[in-house]
Amino acid sequence: MSPCRQLVLSLFALLLASLPGSPHAETNQLVVGVSQFPTNFNPLIDSTVAKSYVLGFARRPLTLYDKDWKLVCMLCTELPSLENGQAVVETLADGRKGMAVTYHLQPDARWGDGVPVTTEDILFSWDVGKHPDSGVSHGETFRRIRAIDAKDAKTFTVHLTRVAFDYNAINDFEVLPAHLEKDAFSTPIDYKTKSRYETDVTNPGLYFGPYRPTSVVRGQYIVFEPNPTWYGKKPAFGKIIVKVIETTPALEANLLSGDIDMVAGELGMTVDGAVAFERRKRPEWVVVYKPELFYEQITVNVDNPILADRRVRQALLYGLDRASMIRQIFQGKQTVADSDVSAMDWCADPNIKTYPFDPQKAAELLEQAGWMAGPDGARRNAGGDRLALELMTTAGNRTREAIELVAQQAWKRLGVEVTLRNQPPRTFFGETVLKHAFPSLALFAWSSFPESLPRTTLASNMAPVQANNFAGQNTGGYKNPEMDRLLDAIEGELDKEKRRVLWHQLQALYAEDLPALPLTFHAVPFVLPQWLKGVEPTGHQYPTTLWAENWHAEK
């Protein structure tokens, strides 16, 4: 090792040592360990769990689902509904039906630089969200809005282009500060890189939550301090430091050394690592396993000629012993996924088609698709091409790398050649997955919320391509007109029981087409110190940090 290299590492060690320690020594401070750093800080671009977690300290959505799975207001004051008159069905100029939904912003909400959060920010955020070149992750949320009327500085009415069962769930409508971001949006196609969330990430005017980031070292840590303009309950900690520690052994070592106080469940220890940690009966911490609407799956690039045949996709799933995988890798604490809808959700179909481990069935499907096994066991088509695929995931994630190895060996026994190629999370999520740039298969998880319509991941027009600046989340490029029809039908059905029937049809189609290979639904481990109170796992995509003002140390 060169002397220069030693100097860099020594300075980094000193920097970490200078970060504040455990609240046992100073009770107004908390250090959190997470396994990933966000791809960027813009709340509208590149939707990842890591970003949701860290922005939860510093921002609040207009609406979201709480820990009881109820839709609630956060940045608004009252949830609009047909019952309270704040939402109405209206007739559009072409005779179709739409909706008008009125929201009232929190009267004391201000950005961290003191500028009030107003309807000007709402209108600007809509302009960004609906622009085809802006690259936002949930563009459909904004494009289904035909107009927004600003009644006054704190009141606005959203006019929807259609009747929708989730008409008042404006969860993905993240609010941007118009006074800071307008210049960056002057050239929409460059907005992602010119946004102040990218170039000036600690600017207080970008945030209005109970905490705001005051120091950011990309890939390493983020320091949050109380936001003096926060309108809600005063936060308890003088500092919250989020440190990125990518592996479970390193997270455990940092816990034991006192360098971190807790490990986030949303993106922290692997299940097997948490189980091993818990078995050692450390009295200082409690491990909470929370069943989640987090769906571990292998997205299929259906533009790959091999994988375009759904018989091949079905064969791959029949060839995986997911029940054994869960016992071996997840210590039995997770459940097999049969679709992208969890059995915990009210709209789940209990009679959905399943794929039990059946190598014989898998072999039959491959033969039907024209892939015959040769003397060496490898499968080839009539042209002599080998059945060869590439599987990718996040480098350093021990659990996913274990799943990869299990899948590779299982599929090898079927005669499928699988090579593994992994990337750092920032590259994998920020470039490869979100730009539909993986050649065959991509292993990762989607987070969700109750009755979450999978439009952005399944609709044909949500495939990320250069033409839409890679704005969609249909990262496999799946396209099926019947799926598009069902997505529209579910969205427009206000009757819950009629909607249940449509949901079951969607799940049946998903199970037949397999745009992704469902693996498991997560039960994630939160490793919390005994003295920390107020952290309440939600079981869905909205992280515990969105209620960070309730976190406190019990003396």
Image (cartoon, rainbow, N blue to C red):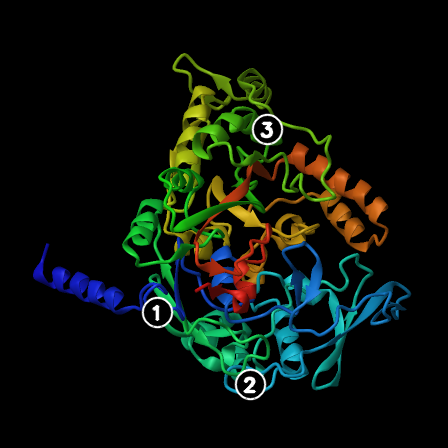
Give the residue number, with chain letter if any, for mark 3. Answer: 314
**Picture quadrant of residue 174:** bottom right
Q: CA distance from mark 1 to mark 3?
A: 55 Å
Give the residue type at disc 2. His
| Residue 538 vertical placement versus 131 (above, below) | above
Q: CA distance from mark 1 to mark 2?
A: 37 Å
Q: Which mark is residue 508?
A: none
**Picture quadrant of residue 393:** top left
Give the residue number, with chain letter if any, for mark 2. Answer: 179
Give the residue type at disc 3. Gln
Q: Residues within 10 Å of mark 3 (few under 14, many from 20)?
A: many
Q: Which mark is residue 26?
A: 1
Q: Looking at this view, is 419 or 327 the one in front?
A: 327
Give the residue type at disc 1. Glu
Asked whether the beta carbons under mark 1 and mark 2 sit within 8 Å of each other, the answer is no
Q: Which residue corresponds to the image point at 58% horizontal and 54% vertical from the top-left?
A: 541
